[in-house]
Amino acid sequence: MDANSTLLLSMVEATNDSFIFSGSLDSVVQNTLAMERFQFAYGWMTQWSKSRVYLLAPPKDFTPPATVTCMSISTETGINPMVNVKHKVELICNSLDFLCTRVDDPTARYEELKGFIDTFRFPTIIGRLPLTLIRKIVAQNVISRCRALMSLQPLKQADALSLDSLLIQKVHEALGFPFRLNSLIATLPINMHGFGFPSIAHINASLVTEGIMRHLNHHLPAYRVLARITLLDWTCE
């Protein structure tokens, strides 16, 4: 039954970002103009310099243009706002960016977090930082950022484990131990004879599991349908 589930999307919005879905470039132009006219009555304006048109799964023989001409209302003083104004908007194929996140692209998120951990530096003091302070710095300055970014786009579990190893390598360099910490032991709780460091892999798995469970039981039907489709895709993969 879930294999036959479908969900028709017309618009998705969060904070200052929004997607308007259409079946063709012409309908994108018309729908965008209609939205501009609607929101003008409430004092909202589109930031055209940050706007993009995304094209998903174009035909193989189709050569997409570099830009698309979108229509908007006039904001010039003394001119009727209903006068159409043209804007050149960049066209991007087979990619979606929402809330500064590439949608359904865990590899891009992994590369971003890997770069962040690679460039992270512990504060320099005379002597070595104590283990308890290093653990606190990791939790507050590294894990907090990783958790926030993974909540928007989770990682592949293998990539999350790789980030754990990379982070523990940073800890090893800061501690100056003659042996390298094993990331699995380093992220074990102290009462289980570990070092008590937060695990990016554990956080990633919990975000995915809790997120899909929450949406499977959401009070809005659209969320439940989308969660079932997502769960079916994960099961097939």
Image (cartoon, helix red, strand yellow):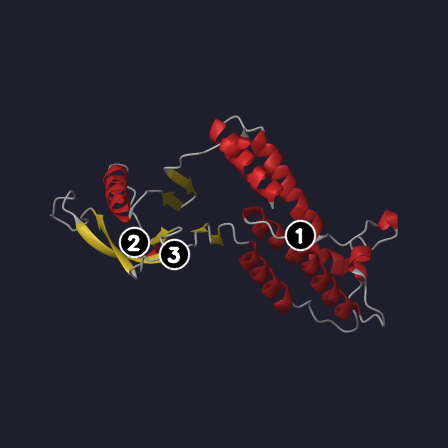
Q: Which mark is residue 48?
A: 2
Q: Earlier in the sequence, mark 1 or mark 3?
A: 3
Q: Bin the neighbour count of mark 3 within 10 Å (Cα to Cα): few under 14, some 14-19, many 20 and up.
A: some
Q: Is 22 located above or below residue 108 in the figure?
A: above
Q: How far separated are the C-alphas under marks 1 and 3?
A: 27 Å
Q: Residue furthest front?
A: 61
Q: Which residue is mark 1?
A: 157
Q: Amino acid at mark 1?
A: Gln
- Left or right, 223 with respect to 55, comes to right
List the residue tagged with mark 3. Answer: 93
Depth order, front residue of 219/38: 219
Residue visible at 35% across and 42% down? 21
Front label number (1 vs 3): 3
Spatial CA span between label 2 and label 3: 19 Å
Mark 2 or 3, which is nearer the eye?
3
The kind of residue tagged 2 is Trp
Q: Nearer the viewer, residue 170 or 163?
A: 163
Percent x, y of residue 186: 80, 57
Q: Residue at x 67, y 60 (%)?
A: 163
Q: Position of residue 19 (x, y in %)?
A: 38, 44
Q: Locate residue 229, reporting x and y percent.
A: 53, 36
Q: Of marks 2 and 1, which one's residue comes earlier in the chain?
A: 2
Nearer to the camera, 208 or 232: 232
> Residue 65 is drawn in which quadrant?
bottom left
Q: Are marks 2 and 3 in contact (CB under 8 Å)?
A: no
Q: CA distance from mark 2 to mark 1?
A: 37 Å
